[in-house]
Structure formats: structure tokens, C-alpha cells
């Protein structure tokens, strides 16, 4: 029982690892003994994050990627296998939003830009499917692994304005359930597919929606806090425990679930 939560030596790949949440998770997992591979588009930022983790005694490397480019992700996977020989966990944290896929407070649905809507779908949903397909292959050969996707509160409850992002995240939740069944029924129960659905954490994607330039809350930010029983935004490190659990053998019988980490937002009732 003492080893249920042990993740020492696990090779963990984090797409979107240069973001606010991704970098925090990477640092935590490295401290727990995992071998962390940060993947992202911002090479300078990624290299700096990896160097900082190594300076703290962790094991971490950065690989530049584009989660929507199959050839690039395949090369990333080949490089990781050449260095470590295996992949134990894939954390699909890459994603984001675009102004044209978000409806302004004084706008309406007719202002939606279909091209930007499609880009948001591609970045979030296709950007989860492609790495999953590629990194699942070595897991199948190993006979064990864990995939953790990033869903969202927007996948559970219809929210104003974030049309494209919400649609993409709902797709990720559905894809998670599909893959859990697909993998268990056709390969092995020792490869599990789950997701986390963060509540409201201040990130690059939502900062302009929730806060003003002076740091005060927007009307939307105030509404979020009002409907969150904890009466605050989440802290990035508060995602780490759930991810650690889903990676570990403690979650050996857990697959196809979307774990909510939201300070009670989804349970709020008047």
C-alpha cells in the first residue's frame, strides 16, 4: 500500500508545458521523482523552465512541438523513446482560446469568426487527439500507461462568450470516455485514460476575461467568485494532487472519468 502513489522514475510528457498550469505541474512531478518532458511552442520559455527544474534537483527536458502537426509530434516521441526508452504518462495540457471564437460582452453569435472557431477546436481537441494517438503506441507496447487530458468547467455547464473553447473542451471529455473504452477493450486495462476539469485558475487564456488591466475583477470574474463556494480562484499547485493520483497505481481501477478540481463551482446552487 505504501507504494500506491509512487511515481518515481515515470517518464511523463506534458504538452502545453510552458503555460502557467503546465509549468507548475512539471515542477511538482519532477520533485516527486518523475522524469519530465515539457513540450511547447515557446522554445526560450521552455528551456528556461526545464533548466529551473534541473537546478532544483529534478529531471526535465524541453522539446519544441506543435500538437497539431503529426510529423512533429512523431519526431518528439521518437526523441523521447531514444532517450528514455518508454513513456509512462501523457498529460495533454496544450490548448487555448482566440478572440474571434469568443463573443464580446456587447456582441452576439453573429460576431463569431468561423475560421477562428475552427482554430480553437483544432488546438484544443485535435491537439489532444494527435499526441494521444502517437504516445499511446509505446504504451501499448509496454503494456501500461496513463493518459490525462485537460477538460474544463465549460464542458459541464454552458457559459456565455466562450463558444469555441467550450465546444472543444466538451469534445475532450467525450474523447476521454471513448478512449478509455477503446484502450481497455482492445489493448489492456493497464492503460488508463482520464481527464481533469479545472475550475477557474488565472491563466494566459482567461486573464482578459476575468480581470481588468488594473488587476480588479471583471463582471465575469465577480460572477465566477460568487458562484464558487471557496470564494477564490484556484492556485496552479492545487491541480497537482489530482494529477499525481491519476498517474499512480492508486488509480488502477479509474478510467474514463473527468475529475473536477474547481473549489465547488460545479456544485453551486442558489
Image: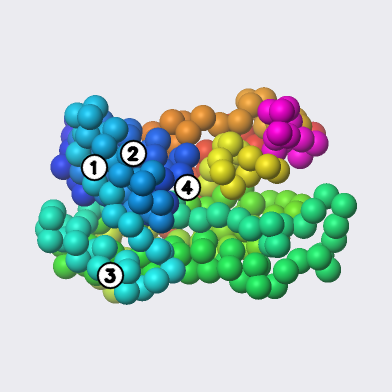
Please determine whether, in this image, residue 267 is positioned above or below residue 42.
above
- In the rendered structure, find residue 196 and report the number of the disc placed on it: 4
Find numbered disc 3 in the image and state the secondary structure of the residue it sits on.
Answer: helix
Q: Please name the residue that numbered disc 2 is placed on.
A: 49
Compare marks 2 and 1 and give the one earlier in the sequence. Answer: 2
Which is in the foreground here, disc 3 or disc 2?
Answer: 2
Count numbered badges in the picture: 4
Residues tagged 4 and 2 counted as in contact (Cβ below 8 A): no
Measure how far apart labels 2 and 1 are at the Cα level.
9 Å
Residue in view at x 80 percent, y 36 percent: 219
Residue in view at x 63 percent, y 44 percent: 206
Compare marks 3 and 2 and give the one earlier in the sequence. Answer: 2
Compare marks 4 and 1 and give the one earlier in the sequence. Answer: 1
Q: Please name the residue that numbered disc 3 is placed on.
A: 74
Q: Please name the residue that numbered disc 1 is placed on.
A: 60
Residues tagged 2 and 1 counted as in contact (Cβ below 8 A): yes
Which is in the foreground here, disc 4 or disc 1?
Answer: 1
The stretch of residues the image draws in magenta is: 210-221
Please determine whether, in this image, residue 164 is positioned above or below residue 157.
below
Amino acid at each position: 500500500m505504501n507504494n500506491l502513489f509512487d511515481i518515481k522514475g515515470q517518464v511523463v510528457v506534458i504538452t502545453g508545458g510552458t503555460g502557467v498550469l503546465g509549468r507548475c505541474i512539471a515542477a511538482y512531478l519532477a520533485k516527486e521523482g518523475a522524469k519530465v518532458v515539457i513540450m511547447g511552442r515557446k522554445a526560450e520559455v521552455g528551456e528556461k523552465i526545464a533548466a529551473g527544474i534541473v537546478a532544483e534537483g529534478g529531471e526535465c527536458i524541453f522539446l519544441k512541438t506543435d500538437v497539431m502537426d503529426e510529423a512533429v509530434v512523431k519526431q518528439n516521441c521518437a526523441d523521447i523513446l531514444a532517450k528514455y526508452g518508454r513513456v509512462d504518462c501523457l498529460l495533454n495540457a496544450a490548448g487555448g482560446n482566440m478572440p474571434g471564437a469568443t463573443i464580446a460582452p456587447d456582441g452576439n453569435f453573429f460576431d463569431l469568426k468561423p475560421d477562428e472557431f475552427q482554430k480553437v477546436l483544432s488546438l484544443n481537441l485535435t491537439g489532444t487527439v494527435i499526441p494521444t494517438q502517437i504516445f499511446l503506441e509505446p504504451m501499448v507496447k509496454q503494456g501500461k500507461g496513463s493518459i490525462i487530458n485537460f477538460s474544463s468547467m465549460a464542458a459541464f455547464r454552458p457559459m456565455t462568450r466562450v463558444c469555441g473553447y467550450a465546444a472543444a473542451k466538451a469534445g475532450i471529455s467525450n474523447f476521454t470516455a471513448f478512449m478509455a473504452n477503446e484502450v481497455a477493450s482492445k489493448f489492456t486495462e493497464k492503460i488508463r485514460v482520464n481527464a481533469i476539469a479545472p475550475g477557474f485558475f488565472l491563466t494566459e487564456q482567461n486573464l482578459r476575461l476575468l480581470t481588468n488591466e488594473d488587476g480588479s475583477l471583471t463582471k465575469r470574474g465577480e460572477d465566477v467568485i460568487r458562484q464558487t463556494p471557496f470564494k477564490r480562484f484556484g492556485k496552479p499547485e492545487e491541480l497537482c494532487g489530482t494529477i499525481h493520483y491519476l498517474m499512480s497505481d492508486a488509480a488502477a481501477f479509474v478510467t474514463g472519468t473527468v475529475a473536477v478540481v474547481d473549489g465547488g463551482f460545479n456544485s453551486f446552487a442558489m
